[in-house]
Image (spheres, rainbow, N blue to C red):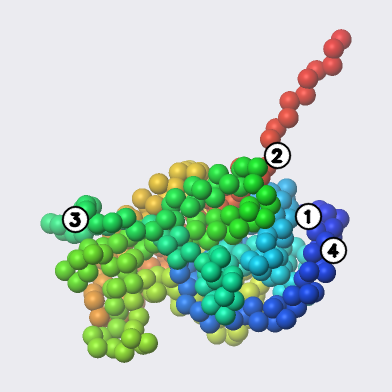
Amino acid sequence: YHSYSIESSKKIEESKMRKILEKAVFVGVITIFMAFPAMGWDDVGHKITGYIAWQRMSPEVREKVIKILLAAPEDSHIPTFFAGYGSRSLETRRREYFMLMAYWPDIVRDKVFENRFKKYHNGTWHYSNIFWTVKDRSPVPVEGLEPAGLALQKIDDFSKLIRSTATDAEKAIAISWLEHLIGDIHQPLHISAKVSDFNPKGDQGGNLFLLTPKGTPRDKQENLHWFWDSILAAYQPNTKELCDADYLDPIAQEIMRLYPYEKLKDTLAPDKVDIWAKESLEISQKKVFKDIRFFEKPSDKYKKVAFETAQERIALAGYRMAALFNEAFSAPATTTTPAAK
């Protein structure tokens, strides 16, 4: 792994320490978010995407990204989360902090922190549903339904913002959202809205496609969107209650072994967000809704296909995220003028 500028990191930490200590009470309750259902990949999926991106980011870019995140507005609580990793090495603290920020847009759904919720939560930013249906056994687009979700637009907006003259505080929010949204749109159902007799206005990314028997009480219902969000954790549960480093890091490393950068680099299509979305839509049409029925649990064969598909999508999301940040935050090349003879 890459080395860090320790001296620079100490300066960043010291400048934030006073404010971090003042927020110690908040740090004690940040784990509340773990009890909330996720939007997009669950916390496991988003953190692993962040881990993979971190491995591909240059030391220079890592340094800049962490510095910017620590300059986030106080009411976002983004700087405070860094204090939660004080017992680990600086390298591990930075990586896990970056991984956690990939989940921050879901953390802010917690209404306990009312001001933060009102200012930073944006439910329609997590998806960009494309309407389609099946006709003569083939997927076809559905016209006439209102567009749903702003994920693709916000990725474009935030990609421009981090390259602009915006303040570091503004860029910190953009970085967290980019981490999250790049992961989200690689979850196939964040691009899909299937129209059917059951759901003539679209199934809201599989949220209306129930997998539990008809008549199951609402609080016990499971749907297709939830199934895909949580497939990694369901297939590889943290039964031993391991910390993130012991639980998530090996999963991420295995995904990178199965889907190495060299294998996928020709499909990255940097900044081609429309291509990323098209991939997810095609997977939704060809795999997500294949061999699955309303009110029935997925088969073991279906679960295996879903798990393997999710692994590849998360790998791609991580590599693409790293490519975006490396391009946005790397110093431009300088040209040296030869000395006059």
Which residue appears at 47% of the width and 77% of the height? 37
State which quarter of the image contains the C terminus.
top right
Between 78 and 137, the one nearer to me in the picture? 78
Between 246 and 279, the one nearer to me in the picture? 279
Q: Distance between the residues labelled 3 and 1?
A: 51 Å
Q: Left or right? Give the position of 167 relative to 108.
A: right
Q: How far apart are marks 3 and 2 (CA)?
A: 47 Å
Mark 3 = which residue? 138
Please name the amino acid that badge 2 sits on.
Ala
Q: Which of marks 1 and 2 is in front?
A: 2
Tell me whether the residue at label 2 lies in contact with that at label 4, contact meaning CB atoms closer than 8 angstroms: no
State which quarter of the image contains the N terminus.
bottom right
**Label 1: element kind:** loop
Kindly identify which numbered label has been placed on residue 4: 1
Q: Where is residue 64 in the image (x, y as percent from the top left)?
A: 71, 51
Mark 2 = which residue? 331
Which residue appears at 12% of the width and 57% of the height? 136
Mark 4 = which residue? 14
Tell me whether the residue at label 3 lies in contact with that at label 2, contact meaning CB atoms closer than 8 angstroms: no
